């Protein structure tokens, strides 16, 4: 079983963000109270495998707030065999004192730092709070505090981004590898989320995105960097040193059941998907009454299969033949032939695995293979 905890607070909204989040400090104590109560209500006997605190910006929580959450987890869940505990953080929050506090909790072994870019001009476009120096300092401070498993987030395909800027980002990351703490890289192509500030800026003509050829060139540069530095790609946007894949996220892609706690958090029990209300005030009010504020849907066999296609084709492991329902196997074996012939997928005795080019087109391939009716 996996546990995800959503912290929706941010300093302010980044231009590209499509996740539910709220700016400011209002009601954080009440929200943490509600989180802890939901954790108690939803306790399970099954041992936890991974814990992930994401957002938003979890590093905006105070030491006391984090201690309360950690204590509630330990009091209500079996953490004796937890393999990985991750907390997301932004560079501007990772002071020496804050990192020492995190280390003193003896709970978080993995940091995921939302750097996004080491270029100050790009950070301003994204409306990030930190600057490039703070980004570098955050990784160095994490190393000094004893964190040996750090994941760095970067974004490619930014407005007006040049090949030289992307190379410079990776060169800066290279300079941090000697610290021996950066074990994982999440590198996303910028997407335009509906309703985001970025979408409005693009519609107004204030910004423009690079064309597809530029982004493909940046992908190529990224692959070369990863190969030189020993990072293996295991998902479309995720790369790690051997043995340091994100165990939590990997289980999402395998459709492992998980509990999601907090406003807008999602859960999955193997058959049903549930999602909490995306409103902090309503979430807090309902939890105070002992009510779990969620909606749900039960997946049909077709829904579950289409989900599996979508997630599995984004990983290097691909579609495992034994996980394909008998009723869909014949159609899949016919539909998948062109992708094998075009070199986007490779068929083995047990799986259909995407090639590097196939990973870049994973979502489109999956959509073509969906069962429509």
Image: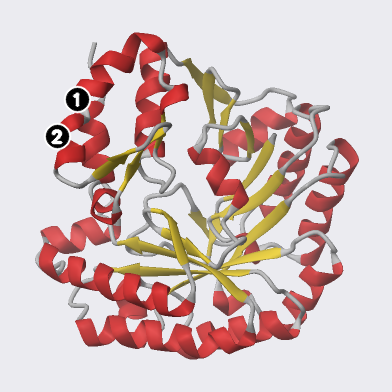
Residue at 44% x, 43% y is: 317
Q: Is residue 106 left or right of residue 188?
A: right
The answer to the question of whether label 1 and label 2 lie on touching residues, with beta carbons closer than 8 A, is: yes
Q: Position of residue 338 (x, y in %)?
A: 14, 34
Residue 143 point in image, percent of width and height: 69, 82
Measured Cα–Cα span from mark 1 to mark 2: 7 Å
Residue wearing tag 2: 338
Q: Quadrant of the C terminus?
A: top left
Q: Residue 93 falls in which quadrant of the image?
A: bottom right
Q: Residue at x 86, y 70 (%)?
A: 104
Q: Is residue 26 above or below residue 315?
A: below
Residue for point 27% across, 85% down: 165
54 or 255: nearer the eye? 255
Residue labelled with disc 1: 335
Is 243 above or below relative to 30?
below
Quadrant in which residue 276 is drawn = top right
């Amino acid at each position: 079983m996996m546990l995800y905890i959503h912290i929706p607070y941010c300093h302010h909204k980044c231009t590209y963000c499509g996740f539910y989040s709220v700016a400011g400090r209002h009601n954080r104590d009440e929200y943490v109270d509600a989180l802890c109560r939901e954790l108690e209500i939803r306790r399970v006997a099954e041992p936890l495998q991974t814990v992930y605190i994401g957002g938003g910006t979890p590093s905006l929580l105070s030491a006391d707030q984090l201690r309360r959450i950690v204590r509630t987890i330990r009091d209500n869940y079996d953490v004796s065999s937890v393999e990985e505990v991750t907390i997301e953080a932004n560079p501007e929050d990772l002071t020496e004192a804050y990192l020492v506090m995190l280390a003193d909790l003896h709970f978080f072994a993995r940091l995921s730092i939302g750097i996004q870019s080491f270029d100050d001009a790009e950070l301003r476009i994204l409306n990030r709070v930190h600057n490039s120096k703070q980004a570098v300092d955050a990784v160095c401070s994490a190393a000094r505090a004893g964190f040996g498993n750090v994941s760095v987030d970067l974004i490619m395909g930014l407005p007006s981004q040049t090949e030289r800027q992307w190379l410079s980002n990776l060169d800066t990351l290279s300079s941090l590898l000697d610290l021996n703490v950066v074990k994982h890289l999440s590198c996303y192509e910028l997407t335009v989320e509906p309703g985001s500030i970025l979408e409005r800026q693009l519609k107004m003509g204030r910004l423009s995105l690079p064309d597809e050829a530029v982004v493909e060139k940046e992908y190529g540069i990224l692959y070369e960097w990863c190969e030189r530095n020993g990072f293996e790609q295991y998902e479309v946007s995720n790369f790690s040193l051997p043995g340091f894949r994100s165990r939590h996220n990997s289980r999402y892609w395998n459709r492992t059941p998980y509990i999601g706690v907090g406003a807008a958090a999602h859960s999955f029990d193997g058959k049903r998907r549930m999602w909490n209300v995306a409103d902090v005030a309503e979430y807090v009010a309902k939890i105070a009454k002992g009510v779990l504020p969620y909606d749900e849907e039960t997946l049909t066999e077709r829904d579950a299969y289409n989900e599996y296609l979508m997630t599995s084709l984004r990983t290097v492991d691909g579609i495992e033949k034994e996980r394909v329902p008998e009723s869909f196997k014949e159609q899949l074996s016919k539909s998948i032939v062109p992708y094998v012939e075009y070199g986007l997928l490779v068929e083995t005795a047990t799986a259909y695995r995407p090639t590097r080019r196939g990973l870049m087109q994973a979502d489109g391939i999956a959509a073509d293979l969906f069962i429509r009716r």
